Image: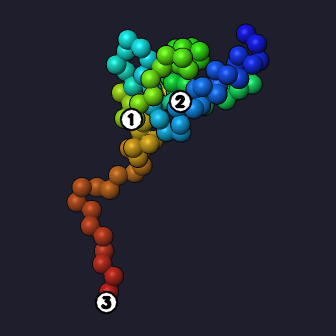
Amino acid sequence: MSTDHIQSIAQTARAKYPAGRCLTLPRSHTVHETSLKLWKGQWIPAPACHVGTFQDVADTGISVYGPSTCNRTRCREMREARSGLNLPQWPDNFQMELFAA
Ligand SMILES: [Zn+2]
């Protein structure tokens, strides 16, 4: 595969999947998180969980808004990080102390 062809695939994918956009692959209902991967010297958005090939993702992948539904480790971790579920949670009965007037 020529350098020009690789650059073309990477440019197509970057235009198709702006930062934060999720994607699905044909014949699948699973929505994946995307992250930038370095592929033959080009940064290219791809499923965070590494499913599919770079060319298929660029050519036939479908750009969608989240939330993702993929439960493979990397997609799940990105989804949880984005939704803030990894942040410490307040206890249910927590009440802030009020400042004295
Ligand atoms: Zn995934």
Q: CA distance from mark 2 to mark 3?
A: 54 Å
Q: Quadrant of residue 63?
A: top left
For mark 1, what is the residue?
66
> Total marks drawn?
3
- Nearer to us: label 3 or label 1: 1
For image coordinates 40% across by 35% down, the residue present is 65
Among numbered discs 3 and 1, the one appearing first in the sequence: 1
Q: Amino acid at mark 1?
A: Gly
Q: CA distance from mark 2 to mark 1?
A: 15 Å
Residue nearest the viewer, comparing 8 with 92: 8
The secondary structure type at the circle numbered 2 is helix
The secondary structure type at the circle numbered 3 is loop
For mark 3, what is the residue?
101
Q: Is residue 27 above or below residue 74?
A: above
For mark 2, what is the residue?
16
Indicate the position of residue 55 as horizontal and vertical percent values: 59, 15
User: Cβ of disc 3 within 8 Å of ligand 1?
Assistant: no
